[in-house]
Image (tube, rainbow, N blue to C red):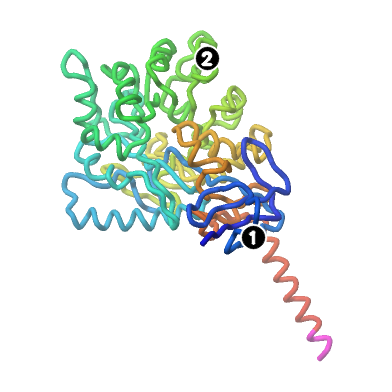
Amino acid sequence: MSSITKFTNCHLIDNGKLYQNTDLYVDNKTQKIIHKPLNFNNIDNIKIIDLKGEILAPGFIDIQNNGIYGLNFSNLNTNSTDEDIKEFKLFYKDAMKKYLSTGVTSLCPTVTSNFSDVYLKVLPIYKRSRLNNQCDSLGAHLEGPFINKQKKGCHPVETFVDANPTIVKPEDKLLEIYGGEKNLLENVCIITAAPEIPGVLELIPFITQNTNCVYAIGHTMTDYNTGLKAINNGCTMITHLYNAMPQPHHRDAGVIGLINTPNVSEKNLPYFGLICDGVHVNPSMINLAYKSNPEKCVLVTDAMHLIGLPDGSYKWDDQIIVKTGDKLYLKDTTTLAGASTTLPQCIRNLMKWSNITLPEAVKTCTNNAAKSIGLEKEKGFLNVGCDADFVVLDHNGYVTRVFKLGNEFKSSDINEDIEYQIETEKSNNKHNNSSRISAVL
């Protein structure tokens, strides 16, 4: 029996453009986008979803996210029992369902610098999924431990390692830390490492060719020329631009200068993650990076597990994180400890700070995000053959509904101005009705 869903009375966002009054069709069996049927008489069942003039866009993709709704993606260790792992999996499933409500339909669970036993236990949980009731994992993002102590951020230095080729075969060290080639092939999407760490430059071709992972520069003190060598070896991404790296100088561009360097072809310029929360990066520097190369800009949340939790102090391993609104700092320091701003809010920030349209901003965490990890034929686009993962947006960029492989979920992205107006109108109507009743009596 053939069955399709037709999204109608809507506008579509894709490729940085708004396609007005355009319908979209989904095969309910494959849960993928299809062409408009040539003959509707051959369709057994047609479900019509009227979006009443709102906007349909691909589901958002978050390629760097450390934790959500109280769940730390790195929170298993040597002492974790089978029961601990079972509970962690249940917690993970619940958190991924909740995160779907923000409009993110797939993400790369990010595991910060850790010991090898942690990777052995957590990575299998993040194997790529295709589910219709929760946010999907696209494979883990391994941020460390091959990173520079001078740009450690909140990563624990006792976990840091190198792959010095004079001591060990670099790929052997990589596999030892991350739990073997199978663990990387099946469960990992991105590896962030500093190219100046001994052995890392030599490892880039192995990472990109043998494990099919994306290699990203991050938490680094590397200079511009070493960055170019990394790109020539296969680097295609920079992790959270500006953060945990030397800042550019007009005679020493550093890592940041790689995003539009004339020494690399336009095609090979690296994608760069950008935390657009107004805390990690000043809005003017957000605008500078975006305008430099909008085709390679990927908005990320870099969210910590405290996203969605109330303000306060929270223990994180042997450290304390203080949450105040969207700001997260290590206690009694000025060290940022990740973020707690949602991806749709980052989109709205980018629209404001770079004076761009909603379609242009949405492109950064749909089209660009999918292309940065090689999934553009499956995710992040409204092309035929892509998964039916969608967000419905109002014209201010707020998520009003979420669809995961065709199943609808309620949004948690609230436009407080609209909510205030609605409550005010309800209150006024109640007052007016009471006045009318009093008058009649």
Name the residue tied to disc 2: 265
Which element carries disc 1, helix, strand or loop?
helix
- Residue 41 bears which disc, if any? 1
The foreground one among 269 and 65 is: 269
From the viewer's perspective, tell me whether residue 319 is left or right of residue 399. Answer: left
**Going by the picture, which residue comes out furthest to the right?**
439
Q: Residues within 10 Å of mark 1 (few under 14, many from 20)?
A: few
Which element carries disc 2, helix, strand or loop?
loop
Residue occupying image coordinates x 69% and y 41%: 18
From the viewer's perspective, tell me whether residue 42 is left or right of residue 161. Answer: right
User: Does residue 309 appear in the picture of this structure?
Assistant: no
The foreground one among 156 and 356 is: 356
> Is residue 357 shown in magenta?
no
In x, y percent, where is residue 33?
55, 48
The foreground one among 90 and 134 is: 134
Residue occupying image coordinates x 33% and y 45%: 126
In the rendered structure, which segment of residues is drawn in magenta? Answer: 437-441
